[in-house]
Image: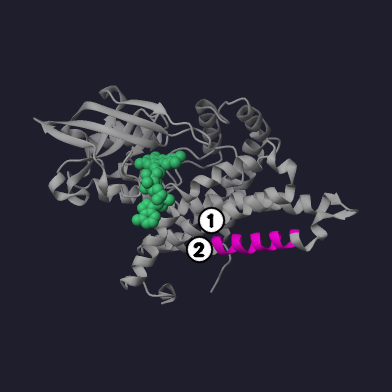
Amino acid sequence: MDFSLTDEQQAIRDTVRAFMTKEVMPLEQQALRRERRGLSALERDELRALQLKAKEFGFWGLSTPQHFGGMDLPAVTQSLIWTETGRSHVPFRFGGEADNILYHGTESQQAEFLLPTIAGERLSCFAITEPAAGSDAANIRMTARRDGDDWILRGEKVFITGGNEADFAIVVAVTDPELGARGGSTAFLVDRAMGWRSEYIDTMGEGGPAALVFDDVRVPGRNVLGEVGQGFTLAMQWIGKGRYAIPSQAIGIAERALGMAVDYANTRETFGRTIGSNQAVQWMIADSEVELEAARALVLRAAWVVDEGGDPRHTSAQAKLFGAAMVNRVVDRVMQIHGGIGYTRELPIERWYRQVRLFRIFEGTDEMLRLIISRDLLRGHTKIGGHLG
Ligand SMILES: Cc1cc2nc3c(=O)[nH]c(=O)nc-3n(C[C@H](O)[C@H](O)[C@H](O)COP(=O)(O)OP(=O)(O)OC[C@H]3O[C@@H](n4cnc5c(N)ncnc54)[C@H](O)[C@@H]3O)c2cc1C
């Protein structure tokens, strides 16, 4: 069993680390100052300028197929990159990406929605969650009623990331209540100009999600994404990607935060010696590193399963469940090790503390992931230790 990175993986990781150190991390103090004044840590045009700089470094469209101008990197390499970007609390991500399900679009949909999204000219959001249907996504109520060649969408979506900025939404609505969500729901590409409204939802994190209102919004039949009845399947495919992207990022946050705790424990003195000479602090550091490495193993394995063409649902659920819980525990301990200064907005720890809480909620709550994992075992879909062959 070989746990080392290939030369190519190492080179990519080092280049991304150099880019983050040179271009993104210098913006951290400014990001913290802005957040204290209630402003965005990174404006849309600033993010775009950074993405274009990254493009010069050769990083554009990590998951985007090469014939669309992307890098089409293996999942393991993408995971290593998300870990590197996660090390900075500036909300940077590489450009040239589009929602994975937009590739199911027809040629004309790809020209209208996919290509401009990859180019960064149009922003998308993905909307399935509703006020009465989150974990129970199969229970959505938004309706899409046929009217000639068009569909009329009526209902509300909530907690939609980027929903207030998006130029178009990928929306899942019920097209046949008799069939239920699987078979009876459909994904639509809906331009903002077609008439949906959005409003920020104030949260404890960066860049609030939005509530979207569809009040009899008319959508042409050509804007159905994939097949009629395929909405739930596409939604699960969209969510699936986040289940190893989120814990990959969690590893980066935990690495950086734990590094800060080690430095602080070695320099802060109380009672005439460094706080790191106390067993209570040593144990927090040790537990954090062990959990961090355990999460890394789960995440890289989940990404490896994707690259091997296996079914990643079980392993990605494990990685997301453990990775999200791990980073919450690590950031909490890092704050504890820093004492009062950790609680201030001078350091990024309190920002991480708020940011990582979300990891346990979106793209599958802890409880839903446990449900998936246990159901797979109880029904015999997965054998204990089965991935070892
Ligand atoms: C910042 C943010 C961004 C988001 N972005 C998006 C987005 O872009 N697009 C989108 O469509 N959605 C998005 N979401 C929605 C997110 O996916 C849901 O919030 C999540 O799925 C949980 O649904 P809920 O909030 O309705 O909680 P509920 O489903 O009401 O659950 C409440 C609690 O009950 C638990 N629970 C529910 N059912 C069970 C059960 N059977 N067994 C045990 N426990 C259970 C849950 O785990 C949770 O702890 C976002 C949410 C947030 C907060």
For the point 40% across and 75% down, the residue is 386
For the point 30% across and 37% down, the residue is 170
Q: Amino acid at mark 2?
A: Leu
The x, y position of residue 68, in whole percent, is 37, 41
The x, y position of residue 127, in whole percent, is 33, 38
Q: Is residue 166 above or below residue 78?
A: above
Q: Is residue 57 magenta?
A: no
Q: Residue furthest front?
A: 132
The front one of 350 and 124 is: 350
Q: Badge 1, how many Cα within 10 Å: few under 14, some, many 20+?
A: many
Question: Residue 276's quadrant in the figure?
Answer: bottom right
Give the residues in magenta. Answer: 281-296
Left or right placement of residue 388 versus residue 1 in this view: left
The x, y position of residue 60, in whole percent, is 48, 41
Question: Residue 114's quadrant in the figure?
Answer: top left
Question: Residue 23's quadrant in the figure?
Answer: top right
For the point 62% across and 27% down, the residue is 34
Q: Main secondary structure of the magenta part?
A: helix
The colour mode here is one colour
Q: Is residue 290 magenta?
A: yes
- Identify the secondary structure beneath mark 1: helix
Task: Give me the disc on residue 189.
Answer: none
Q: Badge 2, how many Cα within 10 Å: few under 14, some, many 20+?
A: many
Q: Is residue 289 above or below residue 257?
A: below
The x, y position of residue 305, in whole percent, is 41, 63
Q: Amino acid at mark 1?
A: Ala
Q: Which residue is mark 1?
A: 325
Q: Which residue is mark 2?
A: 298
